[in-house]
Amino acid sequence: MKTKFKMLLAAATIAVSGFAHAVPVNEFFFSQNAGWLNPITDGDGATYVNPIAFASPFPFTLSMENPTGPLAPANTFGGMRWTDTGGVSSAIHVNTYNNTNSFSSGNMLLGDTDGNGQWNAGEYWAISTLTQENRIITGNFPDPLWVANISANLRIFGDAGHTINAFTDPNHNTLIRFWETLNTQEPGVCASPAPMGSRCDDIYTITLLSLAQQSFPYNGNWYTLTYALFPGNDVLICTSASDPGCDAASAPAPGQIAVYTREGSDSTIHVAMAWQVPEPSMLSLMGLALVGLGFISRRRQTM
């Protein structure tokens, strides 16, 4: 038994040392193609348009705009638009990027921070942008007004020509809940939190789980993708009450990110992605996990 365990330990050590001593890459390439799924027809029980929004006396209409191309998940659209009886509408659009047209948006924490034109380790490059046309519309606003998924096809490549596939995450859904605030109220008397002080801030929430890390092996090394939200114009991101501009009232529920957009503006928020090579200690833990699995398997066989 001890001999078998030693053999497993040696094998895991060799495997881990092989990963640890492989020369990591210094640049990756990516493409992101995403769009909105129609919450009425997508077949997902968690998504919907609140039926009160379509009832008298202030019925809304919802329309999906700009079907996405063949690289995006099927039946997705570039935007959603909701319109009141007076013809005034608000909308939310998604634009996606690859490594050749991603951008820094003037934010030194986002994009090609060293200016060498390469997506290097630790750099957050934008993969998507959400733009909301936040207009003063009339109606009966149930909370939330709608719940919908953005579905994305993310691919990581080992070459600039996008021919060497390193990682693929197709049909990844991000659930977003949207609150259309009561626009007849003045700043300071909004029924819901309005930390931006407009009349009154609209709100949508994003699940933290949809931004969870992902790891993948490539050419003898493991790499980790991490995701983050970066504010563009006229938007406030609250992950907790301690974030700048946020407080206990505007803090999201556990597991959520709250996004506030200024009334009457076109607000933007960027989803960005970075990669890094895991620390050697993480690889050692992976090796120990392999040993543990082997030990359990061996013990079951001898019971």
Image (cartoon, rainbow, N blue to C red):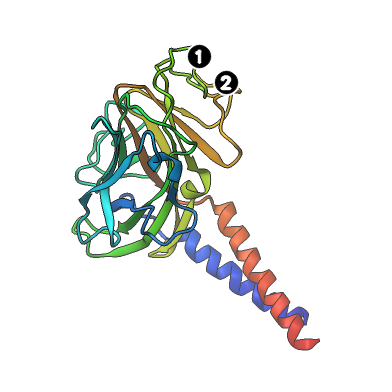
Expressed as whole percent of the image width and height from the top left, the position of residue 80 reads 29, 43
Q: Secondary structure at mark 2?
A: loop
Q: Nearer the viewer, residue 148 or 220?
A: 148
Seen at 26% across and 51% down, the residue is 77
The secondary element bearing badge 1 is classed as loop
Tell me the quarter of the image containing the N terminus.
bottom right
Residue under circle 1?
A: 189
Q: Where residue 103 sits in the image (x, y, percent)?
A: 25, 36
- Circle 1: residue type: Val
Q: Quadrant location of residue 101? A: top left
For the view shown, which residue lies furthest in the right direction?
A: 303
Q: Nearer the viewer, residue 263 or 171?
A: 263
N-terminal-most mark, 2 or 1 = 1
Q: Quadrant of the C terminus?
A: bottom right
Relative to the observer, which residue lies in front, 49 or 238? Answer: 49
Q: Closer to the camera, 30 or 143?
A: 143
Q: How many marks?
A: 2
Q: Residues within 10 Å of mark 2 (few under 14, many from 20)?
A: some
Q: Which residue is mark 2?
A: 247
Q: Is residue 50 visible?
A: no
Residue 302, picture quadrant: bottom right
Q: Residue furthest front?
A: 57
Against 99, residue 4 (above or below) is below
